[in-house]
Image (cartoon, rainbow, N blue to C red):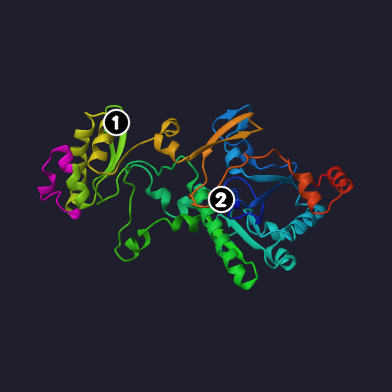
């Protein structure tokens, strides 16, 4: 007896993606990873700049696009003209979710605001991603992840204390916001099953970053303490840092009492009985001294030896990986955490991170890399009822 075919969990869900670059498209990418039919709309003369992004290009193609636009269909459509707006309204009548990350007011300027689209399709969930949100005195401002990370306090904490604020090497604010936007969309879709109505999701970059800032705000409001940049450590949490080896760096996290006892025993030190280090508060108060002692041990060992010894002692420890390391990592391979997908734009397979999280019965899948511009325009418009003559006329008028 054959097992029944299990559809992807979001099969049958149609998502329209407007906007560009990372935050909004990452939201739609997450939905597409689990089977949603994502239709990415781009102006025929102003394609998404993400098509060209990336420090490295292969065959002239940036390497962000195959990932951020994976599992999506491409529709060219000029939303600045009435004919293009009419097509979008017809498409919205068939959709479940619309994701946009224009500056607030842009959709309204085009006559495509949520109140218009939801009058056509009351079940439509509209996800709006922006730097500062759809309301408030700064909502009109353009907002990138870098600015949102700074407004939310994250940039103030990244880097060494004696240097200006640094940044992570990826756009954290964008992907944080895209994740919350997708989460909001799924909440709205769940509620829609009870009410029959869609709603508007307002995902601001700075607020999404703020949500990750743990106890930063009450520490100041109630304790009059302002966190500062601390480099590789978390103040008063020790040991938990990067430590040098003969051939690179490792991260060791052993700040709980039992973990620290195992670390000390593994190293052959009597630190667990030392009143300076025996308690969490004591280790925090003597953090620098303790880190120097651990570094004195790690720096005469190879990474492989430190990893092996820590694993045997059940002490959390891991390498500071580069992309090269991740591609060769046995654990990453065993879990299929990196998949390869053929990209017609590049002409070869592109390795990329797999969908997360892993679902036991209906896991995510990458079925296609980012599409060529307008690759699916005809098939989408055909399903919407536009004839070949209609499409030819729209092309001649630069609508598609």
Q: Is residue 274 magenta?
A: yes
The residue under the point 24% across, 45% down is 239
From the viewer's perspective, is 255 left or right of 319? Answer: left
Of 66 and 32, nearer the camera is: 32
Of 22 and 34, nearer the camera is: 34
Of 211 and 392, nearer the camera is: 392
Which label was assigned to residue 304?
A: 1
Q: Which residues are magenta?
A: 264-281
Place of residue 252 in the rendered image (x, y in percent of width and height, measured from the top left): 28, 42
Residue 221 vertical placement versus 287 (above, below):
below
**Residue 47 is drawn in which quadrant?**
top right
Which label was assigned to residue 30?
A: 2
Task: Say what secondary structure mark 1 lies in.
Answer: helix
Spot the residue most to the right.
389
Residue 260 vertical placement versus 207 (above, below):
above
Quarter of the C terminus within the rendering: top right
Q: Earlier in the sequence, mark 2 or mark 1?
A: 2
Spot the residue most to the front.
1
Would you say residue 133 is visible in this rendering? no
Would you say residue 395 is visible in this rendering? yes
The residue under the point 48% across, 39% down is 336
- Answer yes or no: do the residues labelled 2 and 1 have beta carbons within 8 Å? no
Task: Say what secondary structure mark 2 lies in.
Answer: helix
Place of residue 355 in the rendered image (x, y in percent of width and height, measured from the top left): 52, 46
């Amino acid at each position: 007896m054959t097992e029944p075919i299990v559809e992807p969990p979001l099969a049958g869900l149609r998502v329209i993606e407007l906007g560009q670059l990372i935050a909004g498209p990452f939201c739609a990418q997450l939905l597409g990873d689990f089977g949603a039919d994502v239709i990415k709309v781009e102006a025929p003369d102003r394609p998404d700049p993400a098509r060209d992004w990336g420090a490295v290009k292969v065959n002239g193609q940036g390497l962000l696009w195959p990932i951020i636009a994976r599992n999506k269909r491409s529709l060219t459509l000029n939303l600045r003209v009435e004919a293009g707006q009419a097509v979008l309204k017809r498409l919205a009548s068939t959709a479940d979710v619309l994701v946009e990350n224009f500056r607030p007011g842009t959709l309204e300027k085009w006559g495509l605001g949520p109140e218009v689209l939801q009058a056509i399709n009351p079940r439509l969930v509209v996800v709006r991603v922006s730097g500062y949100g759809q309301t408030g005195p700064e909502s009109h401002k353009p907002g990138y992840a870098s600015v949102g990370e700074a407004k939310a306090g994250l940039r103030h904490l990244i880097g060494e204390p004696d240097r200006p604020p640094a940044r992570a090497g990826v756009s954290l604010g964008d992907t944080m916001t895209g994740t919350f936007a997708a989460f909001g969309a799924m909440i709205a879709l769940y509620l829609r099953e009870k009410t029959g109505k869609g709603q508007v999701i307002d995902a601001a970059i700075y607020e999404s970053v703020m949500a990750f800032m743990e106890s930063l705000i009450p520490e100041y409001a109630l304790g009059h303490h302002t966190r500062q940049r601390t480099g590789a450590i978390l103040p008063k949490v020790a040991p938990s840092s990067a430590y040098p080896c003969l051939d690179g760096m490792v991260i060791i996290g052993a700040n709980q009492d039992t973990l620290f006892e195992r670390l000390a025993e593994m190293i052959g030190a009597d630190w667990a009985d030392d009143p300076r280090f025996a308690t969490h508060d004591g280790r925090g108060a003597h953090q620098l001294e303790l880190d120097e002692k651990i570094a004195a041990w790690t720096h005469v060992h190879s990474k492989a030896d430190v990893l092996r010894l820590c694993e045997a002692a059940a002490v959390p420890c891991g390498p500071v990986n580069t992309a090269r390391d991740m591609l060769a990592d046995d654990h990453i391979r065993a879990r299929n955490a990196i998949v390869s997908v053929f990209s017609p734009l590049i002409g070869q397979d592109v390795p990329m991170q797999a969908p997360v999280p892993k679902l036991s019965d209906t896991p995510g899948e990458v079925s296609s890399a980012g599409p060529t511009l307008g690759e699916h325009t005809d098939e989408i418009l055909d399903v919407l009822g536009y004839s070949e003559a209609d499409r030819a006329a729209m092309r001649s008028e630069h609508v598609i």
